[in-house]
Amino acid sequence: MTDGQPPEPDGSPAAAELDRALTEAVRATGSHAAAVFLLVPEEQALRMEVVTGLSGRVVRPWSRLALAAPVPVATAVREGRPVWVRGHAELARRFARTAYALPYELAMIVVPLATDGTKWGALQMLWPGTRAERLTPGEESAVTAAADRMSRALARAAASGDALRPAPAPRVLPAEAPARRPPAEAQAAADLAERLEVGVFSLDLDGRITFLNARAAELLGRTKADLMRTRPWETLPWLDDPAYEDPYLGALFSRLPSRFTALRPPDRWLSFLLSPDATGISVRVWPAGAPEGSPAWRSAPSATAPSRAGALYHLLYISAGLTEAVGLQDVTAAVTDQIMPVLGADGFGLLTADEGRIEILATRGFSPSSTAYFEHLPLAAGTQGARVVETGEPAFFSRPDELRRAHPDIALYREMDGWAFLPLNASGRTIGYCVLGYADGRTFGPDDRAALTSLAGMIAQALERARLFDAKNRLAHVLQNALLPRSLPDVPGLRVAARYLPATRGMDIGGDFYDLIRLDGSAAAAVIGDVQGHNVGAAALMGQVRTAVHAHASTGAPPGEVLARINRLFEDLETDLFTSCLYARLDLPRQRATVASAGHLPAIVRRPGGGADIVRARSGILLGVEADAGYPATEIPFPPGAVLLLYTDGLVERPGTDIGTAVHELADRLAAAPADSLDALADGLIREARGSDRGRDDIALLLVGPEER
């Protein structure tokens, strides 16, 4: 596609119907820009098919979206529901990544296109952020009708064997032209513009100057002939900076006025006011004083910044997924599932260099044999990737000849025609490389090379963070597992099952603990507790409390006394952390259980014949609050076939639900679940908790029950 020019329509009935429906929806709703995205299942991507109100050049950075991306268009398609966003503040709250890429005050709706469960894509429409809170009934009806027409047209095309496929670049529908003025009136307007003391010029939707008066040419320092049909930031070097192109994009996307001040070298400051409408942007320019103290005003373009504001925001968008990634698995998933589809590559590899050999972290689009060839390949093999690791410099091949001549024996290099090898530079060294393959070749312009190289640097930094996180995570879990019981003792006549599910990550390890202590041949103690906080200190205190429980339980002390002794121990530990704990002595011959609690959630007992009761024992205060606190005990029946459940708050807490209600719901689940296998029962309770919208707390649970005779 020629830059800024729409491609020729493909003549298909489906494309024509999309165009008509889109045009009518824009006219009926007052939307200033709209686009249709088509789902490409094999790419797991959404690609813009047609757009109106914006140029192809302007929308290019946003014309390809990963289906997995947390952005409005992809969300609407995945979830099969409309997404309405009112203003940039709401966009930032709900879709932070899109807010990075579109930092403009606009409102939007995205409606999925689907028929009978088949997803086709989405319709996206934009309005200024100053519009009303919601669509009017008439506007909503027009949008729904347009989406239905588009969905049916796409379904008919697919059923006829002529499914509509998006072109490499979106088709651009021209905006409705304003009414033509009589020649005399047009000449009068031009004469009026020439008499103005300020400079005025107009930009079309692609940013090209279509008219300017003599005063504007004088202020800009060029002739009319030099400036007509050019973009100001490309013709005037002192405007070639994202800080100056961005107000144009802001006016274009939001249809709201914007302004900026720039320095025309050597010392002339100019103010620009941009006023947009459906056909372009009118610009006023006049002399201004130098702005004071604001780093936003620049006198020269940055040598390192991408030369286009759109390229800069595109880079921010596709790299935002890396900021959300934590471990190594998260990074590779973000790159392969969210970033690769946006880049439009047919093949992708993420490889690291470790001890002189290549290690493949992720690959997609290349043959299995090629992947097997590179796995554990020595860097000394002299592949193009190895050269990139050695030099730390990227390599781009728009055509395959040079690469294939240099490496005739590497089958992978015959699979694609265009290549980009990008070094992963972090902490002053090259830790690996990314390889992108393009089946039909690829021309890598300066913006593409700068953006891809910058993105590779961000991937490298994300990998460094991920490796550090994974190392800390392993250390934390080793510590935590060492403090929890490796196995529970075998107590004759007692069935036992325990589970622990960490919800936090990295070094934020929790203080939840459980234990089963054999007291003598006919009795045991079941314990569960939760130390305040999620850090190494909490885990260490948890280990000390577990050890103290063992020591005092082994003396045969009753449950209330065990808790009282541990509570007095907190004075010696000199900690400001509090601990909840529930201690139950299980007397199997007497078929009784004695329960004492230090501010912990109540135990639940499942009766042998079905049904469950919440143990309404009086609770003492948390351990570590008052040194002389007492802990009353409550005795309950514990016959064969009964099951006692001890748990921490991670099993029941969830946003918006009262804790008492949640405990009752847990009792109902325990009563309804089969209790033939305590392991199966424990797994079911954990599975339900993991699948619900829980908070960020750990989960520990302990199930004990006398065997049925």
Image: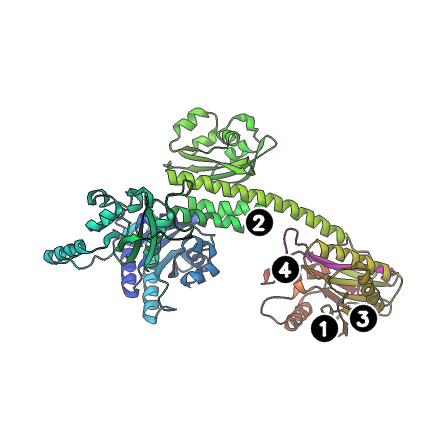
Q: Secondary structure at mark 3?
A: loop
Q: Position of residue 491 (x, y in %)?
A: 83, 59
Give the spatial CA distance, label 2 vs label 3: 43 Å
First in sequence: mark 1 vs mark 3? 1
Q: Disc 4 residue type?
A: Arg
Q: Quadrant of the C terminus?
A: bottom right
Q: Quadrant of the N terminus?
A: top left
Within 10 angstroms of label 1, few (less than 14), some, or many (20 or more) residues? some
Give the spatial CA distance, label 3 vs label 4: 37 Å
Within 10 angstroms of label 3, few (less than 14), some, or many (20 or more) residues? some
Q: Which numbered dot is residue 326?
A: 2
Q: Secondary structure at mark 2?
A: loop
Give the spatial CA distance, label 4 vs label 1: 22 Å
First in sequence: mark 3 vs mark 4? 3
First in sequence: mark 4 vs mark 1? 1
Of marks 3 and 4, the one in the foreground: 3
Q: Which residue is mark 3?
A: 629
Is residue 501 in the magenta section?
Answer: yes
Is residue 502 in the magenta section?
Answer: yes
Q: Disc 3 residue type?
A: Ala
Of marks 2 and 1, the one in the foreground: 2
Give the spatial CA distance, label 2 vs label 1: 40 Å
Dividing the picture into quarters, in which one does residue 26 lie?
Answer: bottom left
Q: Which numbered dot is residue 614?
A: 1
341 or 623, which is in the foreground? 623
94 or 418, which is in the foreground? 94
First in sequence: mark 4 vs mark 2? 2
Q: Which numbered dot is residue 687?
A: 4
Residue drawn at point x = 43 percent, y = 31 percent = 414
Of marks 2 and 3, the one in the foreground: 3
Are discs 2 and 1 less than 8 Å apart at CB? no
